[in-house]
Image (spheres, helix red, strand yellow):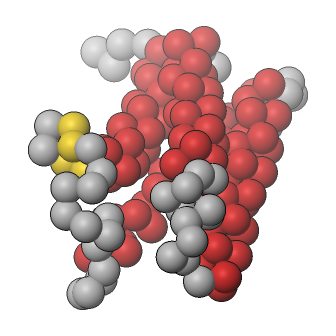
């Protein structure tokens, strides 16, 4: 397993865990007085789950084992950011849902709401890291 690919996956894992916590545990989400107690409950639960999976993924990336064990650990760790952010796109596709309460409330990056932009970047970074780890291991295919 090569270092560059693992570093990209690690960055995506850290960015996902920290990103979810920073985005949700603040006055616009968990501490928003307009939110119902049950919505707050689900947000805290989801955030704690994300942080927990981030910690497990970091542990998987650091532990040593056989080549097969390290490959499985990398695969699971690389899937965490993707599975963590995929629901953003599913939820955005549900009729009547929105990526923000009021249009323009969330900053835009290249015209995309920052939450969806981050979801795409973290997922892509993780997938790229995983693929890069294998491309470097396998060497040129010619």
The answer to whether 34 is drawn above or below residue 127 in the figure is: below
The answer to whether 59 is drawn above or below residue 33 in the figure is: above
Query: Where residue 80 sits in the image (x, y, percent)?
Result: 60, 49
| Quadrant in which the N terminus is drawn | top right
Q: Which of 140 and 128 is in front in this view?
A: 128
Q: Which residue is drawn at 62% across and 62% down?
A: 31
Q: Which of 52 and 78 is in front in this view?
A: 52
* Residue 120 visible from this viewpoint: no
Q: Quick one: which residue is furthest to the front in this view?
A: 33
The answer to whether 82 is drawn above or below residue 124 in the figure is: below
Query: Where residue 104 sits in the image (x, y, percent)?
Result: 19, 55
Q: Residue at x 80, y 25 (%)?
A: 62
Query: Where residue 52 sits in the image (x, y, percent)?
Result: 77, 51
| Quadrant in which the C terminus is drawn | top left
Q: Which residue is drawn at 25% across and 67% down?
A: 102
Q: Which of 112 and 93 is in front in this view?
A: 112
């Amino acid at each position: 397993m090569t270092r560059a690919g693992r570093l990209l996956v690690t960055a995506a894992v850290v960015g996902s865990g920290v990103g979810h916590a920073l985005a949700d545990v603040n006055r616009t989400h968990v501490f928003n007085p307009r939110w119902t107690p049950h919505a707050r409950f689900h947000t805290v639960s989801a955030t704690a789950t994300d942080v927990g999976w981030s910690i497990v993924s970091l542990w998987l990336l650091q532990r040593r084992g056989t080549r097969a064990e390290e490959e499985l650990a990398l695969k699971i760790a690389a899937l965490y950011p993707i599975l963590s952010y995929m629901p953003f796109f599913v939820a955005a596709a549900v009729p009547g849902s929105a990526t923000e309460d009021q249009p323009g409330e969330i900053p835009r990056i290249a015209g995309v709401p920052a939450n969806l932009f981050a979801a795409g970047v973290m997922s892509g970074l993780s997938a790229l890291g995983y693929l890069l780890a294998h491309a470097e291991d396998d060497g040129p295919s010619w």
